[in-house]
Image: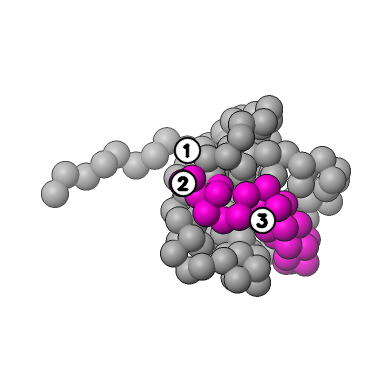
């Protein structure tokens, strides 16, 4: 079973995105990034992306994470902002009573996007 199905499918992703953006827009650390954004369109893209990323039906047609965020990195997007987004996502999932192990899976998946969102080359793997 995919993470998408384990989370509750389309209805669960839709609810999570709606709650998530409510928190994001109230967070003074990151709300300014969304001042000139069509939030209905943004939420729709986010729902499609999360559905795809969690193993659900693939209807995402947006840019890849690096291309989609390059203009924001040029304006100063950094790890502190990424951390705030993750924090708001966790808060949203907890508010929706998502099981802690599923929240951890979502966070792990989101963390795999950090280097692309922030337009940097990932650190080389270290050998043990």
| Closer to the eye: label 3 or 1 | 3
Counting residues from the start of the chain, the first of labels 1 and 2 encountered is: 2
In this rendered view, identify the residue nearer to me: 40 or 52: 52
Percent across and percent down for residue 43 are: 76, 46
Q: Residues within 10 Å of mark 3 (few under 14, many from 20)?
A: some
Q: Disc 1 versus disc 2: distance between alpha carbons?
A: 33 Å
Is residue 21 shown to the viewer in this render? no
Is residue 48 shown to the viewer in this render? yes
| Closer to the eye: label 1 or 2 | 2
Counting residues from the start of the chain, the first of labels 3 and 2 encountered is: 2
Percent across and percent down for residue 78 are: 57, 51
What is the magenta range?
Answer: 1-27
Q: Disc 3 versus disc 1: distance between alpha carbons?
A: 32 Å
Classify mark 2: helix, strand or loop: loop
* Residue at 26%, 41% in the rendered image: 125
The residue carrying mark 1 is: 120
Counting residues from the start of the chain, the first of labels 3 and 1 encountered is: 3
Q: Determine whether 96 is above or below 65 in the image.
A: below
Furthest residue in direction front, as rendered: 1
* Residue at 68%, 39% in the rendered image: 48
**Does 24 appear in magenta?**
yes
Classify mark 3: helix, strand or loop: helix
**The quarter of the displayed image where residue 124 is located:** top left
| Closer to the eye: label 3 or 2 | 2
Furthest residue in direction left, as rendered: 128
**The quarter of the displayed image where residue 89 is located:** bottom right
**Does 4 appear in magenta?**
yes
The residue carrying mark 2 is: 1
């Amino acid at each position: 079973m995919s993470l998408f199905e384990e989370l509750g499918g389309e209805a669960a992703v839709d609810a999570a995105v709606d709650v998530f953006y409510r928190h994001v827009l109230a967070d003074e650390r990151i709300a300014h990034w969304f001042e000139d954004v069509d939030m209905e369109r943004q939420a729709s893209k986010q729902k499609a992306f999360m559905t795809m990323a969690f193993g659900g039906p693939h209807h995402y047609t947006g840019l890849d994470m690096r291309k989609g965020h390059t203009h924001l990195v040029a304006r100063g997007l950094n790890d502190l902002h990424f951390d705030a987004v993750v924090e708001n996502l966790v808060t949203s999932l907890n508010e929706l009573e998502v099981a802690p192990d599923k929240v951890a899976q979502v966070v792990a998946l989101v963390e795999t996007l950090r280097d692309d969102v922030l337009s940097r080359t990932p650190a080389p793997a270290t050998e043990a």
